[in-house]
Image (cartoon, rainbow, N blue to C red):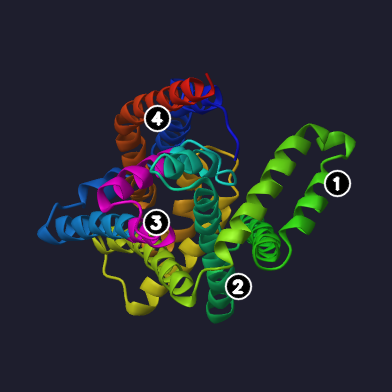
Amino acid sequence: MQTSDDELIKKFEPRRIILPLIIAIAVAVVIIYSGFDAEAYRRIELTSSVVFWIIIAVIMMVIRDLAYMYRLRVLTDDVISWRRSFVVIMLWEFASAISPGIVGGAAFAFFLINNEKVKMGKSVAVVLTTSFLDELFFVLMAPLIFFVVGKHLLFDTLGGDSAIVTYEKGFYYGFWVGYGIICAYIVVVSYAIFVNPRAVKYVMVKVATLPLIRKFRQAAAETGDDLIIASKELRKQNFSYWFKSFMATVFSWTARYMVVNCLIMAFITLSLADNFMVYARQLVMWILLLVSPTPGGAGIAEVVFPQFLKEFIPIGLAAPLGVMWRLISWYPYLIIGALLLPRWLRKYLAQKKESSKIRAEKEG
């Protein structure tokens, strides 16, 4: 997680923020235009029920963020206040929103937490643990959902057209590839944290000596060091630490999923079984988005949403609801993060400059 100040600033150049916006907006326009149904739009009425469920959807995102803030406080032993937790989470989500799903905002998160007067070792442990808990949620929930719901209801419900069947197979295999990557991550990190971090570092560095990936050798060594540091911090934590942080993870992801349920409920009544099915489909969607190569899953999220959930949505409204979902669950982090980032960077660089000055005076 070693990143220079120049690299940190470069990560947030305007073009890196604009790119995911362009991708998301372009895909949204194409999807809405290609599936535009004037009659479906005319049937929409802004009733009190519609407004109510949209408000509940927004509240679900607030609950999701509060759960993340609570988890951050648990993981840092309450060193970070609720107010500062809000800033950290908003900027962390901002970094994730402009990074490929498989990369996330972990490198920037270390700077965020360390800048809140959390020791380096603890900061590394917090970042690693948040990622570990998020992935653990998927590792535990995905097979449970798959075996309870079944392959047919999760993937084979779009019809018999050969092109659609191919599309379904792509989602199905993509799901298991993504799940396999997440499982591999969990196994490696679990072994590193609780068994032998030095062995994991040794293997990572050795693998990084291969000709095609030799340029990543330094990064592999630094990641190995991070695992050793995190292991020392995390081995001494008790059951309460892990239970509270994992339950906060479950609450945060469930609240995020309920955003979609609420948006659909704004336009059509779902049974309890249908609500569960929407939840199950979203778990599959998010595993695909977690290994997305595009920033924040931009473009892919807009395509996957109507394909997975259109049977629960009134005809002609799948694409617009997908855009509304992103407006509530993704765009706010881009906006809030862009507003908070300049001030945070100024403060961070000023503190670094002051620390360097004090260190120089002591050495002098």
Q: Which residue is mark 2?
A: 151
Residue at (47% x, 43% y) in the render: 109
Contact (CB < 8 A) between labels 4 and 3?
A: no
Percent of width and height locating residue 227: 65, 53
- The type of residue carrying mark 4 is Tyr
Which marked residue is nearer to the observer: mark 2 or mark 3? Answer: 3
Which marked residue is nearer to the observer: mark 4 or mark 2? Answer: 4
Contact (CB < 8 A) between labels 2 and 3?
A: no
Q: Is label 2 in a helix, a strand or a loop?
A: helix
Which residue appears farthest toward the top when viewing the image?
A: 364
> How much space separates mark 2 and mark 1, taking CA atoms?
39 Å
- The type of residue carrying mark 2 is Lys
The mark nearer the N terminus, 3 or 1, is: 3
Q: Is label 4 in a helix, a strand or a loop?
A: helix
Percent of width and height locating residue 198: 76, 56
Residue 116 part of the magenta-drawn span: no
Q: What predominant SS class does the magenta segment belong to?
A: helix
Which marked residue is nearer to the observer: mark 4 or mark 3? Answer: 4
Q: Which quadrant, please, contains the N terminus?
A: top right
Magenta highlight range: 67-94
Which marked residue is nearer to the observer: mark 1 or mark 4? Answer: 4
The mark nearer the N terminus, 4 or 3, is: 3
Which marked residue is nearer to the observer: mark 2 or mark 1? Answer: 1
- Which labelled disc corresponds to residue 348? 4
Residue at (78% x, 49% y) in the render: 204
Contact (CB < 8 A) between labels 4 and 2?
A: no
73 vs 29: above or below = below
The mark nearer the N terminus, 4 or 2, is: 2
On the question of residue 96 being in view, the answer is: no
In which quadrant of the rendered view does residue 182 lie?
bottom right
Q: Which residue is mark 3?
A: 72
